[in-house]
Amino acid sequence: MTTTTLAALVPLLPFLGAVAGLALGRTAPGFVRPLAILPTLTATVLAVVVAVRQGGGRAIDAATQLTPTGSVPIDLALHLDGFAVLVAVLVGLVATCVQLYSTAYLRNDARYPSYAALVSLFTSAMLLVVYSGDLMVLLVGWEVMGICSYFLVGHYWETPEARAASLKAFLVTKLGDVPFLIGLFALAADTGSFRITKILAAVTNGGLDHPALIALLLLAGVAGKSAQFPLHTWLPDAMAGPTPVSALIHAATMVAAGIYFVARLLPVFAASGAALTVLAVMAAVTMVGSGLAALAQDDIKRVLAYSTIGQLGYMSGALAVGDRGAAVFHLISHGAFKAVLFLAAGVVIHAAGTNSLAAMSRMGGLARRIPDAYWTMTVALLALAAIPPFAGFFSKEAILVAAEHTAVGDRAVAPAAAGWTVLIAGLAAAVLTAAYATRLWLLAFRGRGAEAPDHGRQPVAMTAVLWILAVPTIAFGLTSGVIGDWFDGHALTPSLTTAVLATGVTLVGGLVTYGAWRHTTALAARTPIGAVAAHPGAEPALVEAEAMTSHTAAYGTIAAAADPADPGRLLLGPLHRHAVTGFHLDALYTALFVRPVQQAARLVRFLDRTVVDTYVNGSGAVTRLLGTAVRRAQTGNVQTYLGALLAGSLVLAIAAVVFANVNAGS
């Protein structure tokens, strides 16, 4: 087969698996798990073959007209460059691991067939976004992911948290998609095409008439999909979904789509210095704000959610200084270690019977119960904190090096102000990342108290994938010196200055947090706290659902456990109560948008039910009264009809005589 044929099969196979899984879910349930795993696994193998054939060389393009539009045509196009083929391998690998993990995690879930089909459809949509060479086809995958996320986040629809989270994720991302769609049409109007290659050629030739406006409109959609400030608030709440879904969304699909889109069209954004400056500020606020919020969270998955927001901020920062190679390098590196973190967190929640770090800090022996999750999560947290030689160190250093070069004027793609903004915020975020990663590890695995509940040995399907994903977490960064051809030929190796500086501040953040933990851990025994849902024989998904329910009852909906033994509370001080709520952005949006919309809806309901319905009902009542009056006149008596006819004729005759005399007199 040709490379383009293989590439076309990559998104098609998971789609066919999703259709078959939905069709056979009830009639032949024994086929559901093979249909969930095998198409995705085959697509991953084909994606590897496509990546090997592409080899980081010249991009491979193929297209056929999908439909004539009368103006700007829409093509079914493939664009396979180094970025696309590597990201597709990441998506396939993570999706395959998630499907394997889910067979054990939701082994007795009645809704598993629809869940597995939606995961396959989600994977297919992201692969379509990755390989697509036409923006309208890319938009199809973009929107399908939004729909899939709504259903998957709301998988535990019996719980109010899941229902609210799924609706919030859908609405917030759609809020960004409206200007995004307008931006796509404006871009096509300026360049005359939806094809990515033709758009980039037009930009190179100066064919973009409104670069700043188009770039800012597109950034709104990117901010929503990739959870960047100010449209990031949906992602922490989306942790109400199953843990494998969280891994898929955070590591390889939905939130990565926005970053990948900007990387694809970076020359469009680079045509406007103002747009890059806005992106740099957005990235800086996202990095620092999410780091502070992560340090205050009690729910282990919310810590990881804010971590994802911050790491996406790093990627946005790389794009803001004009280095898409560093951005995609970190996207792939982050996808590997973040998948490990979420899937390991699912094992931890199952073993501990709670998602509360405060409760875990009062358990002993949790690390011994789950050695696979303990060691792989430790490695992934080291990669997250950018400790050498793990993958996160090399990819984060590539971003800081790019920001440094822009700041000092060695690169002229972006304004120097954008470079300084990203560099300073990146170093500050490095301290915070090390702090919340250290805090999570200490509270989860170095707790003191009663033994953690014994749920037996974790299923092999859940632990094996952790080690599979740990391989790129450890080794991918070591390839930075040889994979430059896949990333526009740019060097991705660290520089001595940023490496020493970033590693130094990272160690400071970790050591300070360790010192705070040593100071506060003695208070844990004095303050018993926690709500644990321990069911040794239950499936992990049931434990997670019950843990979320009990967590809300114990700590409230914002995970604000008043735990004096929390080192994050000591480090943040008075800022803790603001950071734990995400700096009250949800409350602000509720006041500015939600309540006014609700009031407007109430007004419309009042006008509809009181004014419009009264008018309509009144019209009907008058008609009924007239009908009643006419019905009473229909007696069936011929004499009555003749009398009425003669009386009417007499009245008409008299009226005619009167009018004739009046007219004659005048």
Image (cartoon, helix red, strand yellow):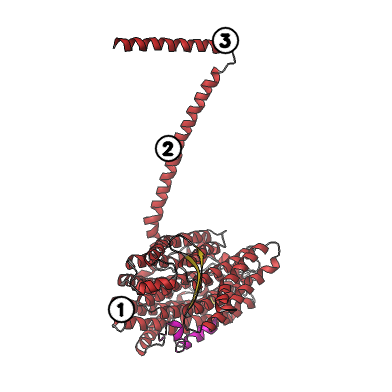
Residue 572 place in picture, x, y as percent? 37, 73
Residue at the spot of label 1: 420
Kindly indicate whether the residue at mark 3 contacts the one at mark 2 (C-beta within 8 angstroms): no
Q: Is residue 248 left or right of residue 399?
A: right
Mark 1 or mark 3: name the one nearer the start of the chain.
1
**Amino acid type for the residue under numbered disc 1:** Trp
Mark 2 or mark 1: name the one nearer the start of the chain.
1
Q: Quadrant location of the N terminus?
A: bottom right
Which stretch appears magenta?
Answer: 469-491
Residue at the spot of label 2: 611
Other residues around mark 3 within 10 Å, as few (<14) / some (14–19) / many (≥20): few
Which numbered disc covers residue 639?
Answer: 3
Task: Give the residue at x 32% y 83%.
Answer: 405
Other residues around mark 1 within 10 Å, as few (<14) / some (14–19) / many (≥20): some
**Amino acid type for the residue under numbered disc 3:** Gln
Near-viewer residue (207 or 343) = 207
Other residues around mark 2 within 10 Å, as few (<14) / some (14–19) / many (≥20): few
SS for callout 2 = helix
- The Cα–Cα distance between marks 1 and 3, rounded to whole angstroms, is 102 Å
Q: Main secondary structure of the magenta part?
A: helix
